[in-house]
C-alpha cells in the first residue's frame, strides 16, 4: 500500500514480481496470471507502458479485451472529484447502450463534456458458466438472472444487483444482502474471465464517438 507521494512499497512489490517472472497468483480464484495483465512483462516493457500513459487514449473498442481481475494496482481517490475537471475519459460496457444506465452515462458525458467510449463488452452463455472458478453456486445464479436468450452480460448482472436493492426479500435464499452481492461479484468475475467479446452494437454511441 502507498500514496501518490509515497509509492515506494507499491513499486518495490511490482518490480519484485516482474523479477520473479512477471506472474501473479491471487488467493482466489487460485490461478496464475500475468502481472498487470501484460504477458511476459519485463522492466523495459513496463517503462514503455508508463510512457504510453501520457499519450492520448486509443478507442477501447479497437483494443484487445482486458481480463485483469485481482492482479491490478487498485487506486482510491480520497478527495472531492469534479467531473468537469478531473475525468479524462468515461468507458463503459456496450450492453448498457440501450438501457436507462446508458442514458445516464450519455447525459453525464454531454453535461460535463467527457469523452464517452464503449469497449468490446463480454457475453457468456449460462451453459458455459463453470462451477470450479468461483464456486458451485455461480452457475445456478447465472441461470436465475439470465434473459430469455440465455446470455449473461454486464447489464444483466446490473439488473440483478438493482433487484437485490429494491426487492431484498426476493433474494433471501441467497443469504444476507452482502452475501448475495458477493455472489453477483463472483459471477461478474466469471463473465470477465470466460466471456467472449460482445458484438458491437449498431447504436452510434457504441462507435466511440465523442459525446458533447
Image (cartoon, rainbow, N blue to C red):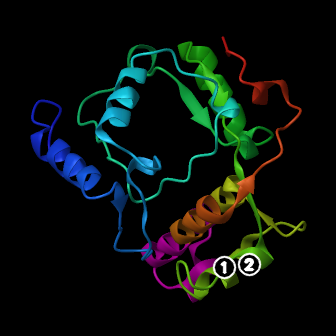
Q: Residue under circle 2?
A: 144
* Left or right for 94, reference 165: right
Q: Is residue 168 magenta?
A: yes
Foreground: 5 or 203? 5
The reply to whether residue 201 is in sight is yes
Foreground: 14 or 119? 14
Rendered image quadrant of residue 108: top right
Q: What is the x, y in percent for residue 60?
A: 63, 31
Q: Residue under circle 1?
A: 141
Q: Is residue 37 magenta?
A: no
Q: Is residue 36 above or below residue 127?
A: above
The reply to whether residue 1 is in sight is no
Part of the protein shown in magenta: 160-183
**Label 2 close to label 1 by CB (< 8 Å):** yes
Q: Secondary structure at mark 1?
A: helix
Q: Is residue 20 above or below residue 73?
A: below
Amino acid at each position: 500500500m502507498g500514496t501518490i507521494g509515497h509509492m515506494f512499497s507499491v513499486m518495490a512489490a511490482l518490480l519484485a514480481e516482474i523479477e520473479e517472472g512477471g506472474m501473479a497468483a491471487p488467493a482466489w480464484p487460485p490461478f496464475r496470471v500475468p502481472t498487470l495483465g501484460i504477458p511476459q512483462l519485463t522492466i523495459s516493457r513496463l517503462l514503455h507502458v508508463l510512457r504510453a500513459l501520457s499519450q492520448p487514449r486509443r478507442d477501447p473498442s479497437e483494443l484487445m479485451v482486458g481480463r485483469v481481475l485481482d492482479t491490478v494496482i487498485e487506486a482510491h481517490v480520497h478527495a472531492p472529484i469534479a467531473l468537469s475537471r478531473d475525468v479524462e475519459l468515461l468507458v463503459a460496457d456496450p450492453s448498457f447502450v440501450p438501457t436507462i444506465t446508458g442514458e445516464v452515462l450519455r447525459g453525464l458525458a454531454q453535461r460535463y463534456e467527457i469523452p464517452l467510449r464503449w469497449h468490446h463488452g463480454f457475453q457468456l452463455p449460462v451453459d458455459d458458466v463453470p462451477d470450479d472458478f468461483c464456486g458451485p453456486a455461480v452457475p445456478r445464479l447465472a441461470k436465475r438472472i439470465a434473459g430469455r436468450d440465455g446470455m449473461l452480460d454486464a447489464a444483466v448482472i446490473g439488473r440483478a444487483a438493482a433487484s437485490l436493492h429494491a426487492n431484498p426479500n426476493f433474494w433471501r435464499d441467497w443469504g444476507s444482502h452482502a452475501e448475495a452481492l458477493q455472489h453477483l461479484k463472483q459471477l461478474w468475475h466469471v463473465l470477465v474471465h470466460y466471456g467472449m467479446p460482445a458484438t458491437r452494437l449498431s447504436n452510434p454511441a457504441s462507435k466511440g464517438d465523442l459525446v458533447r
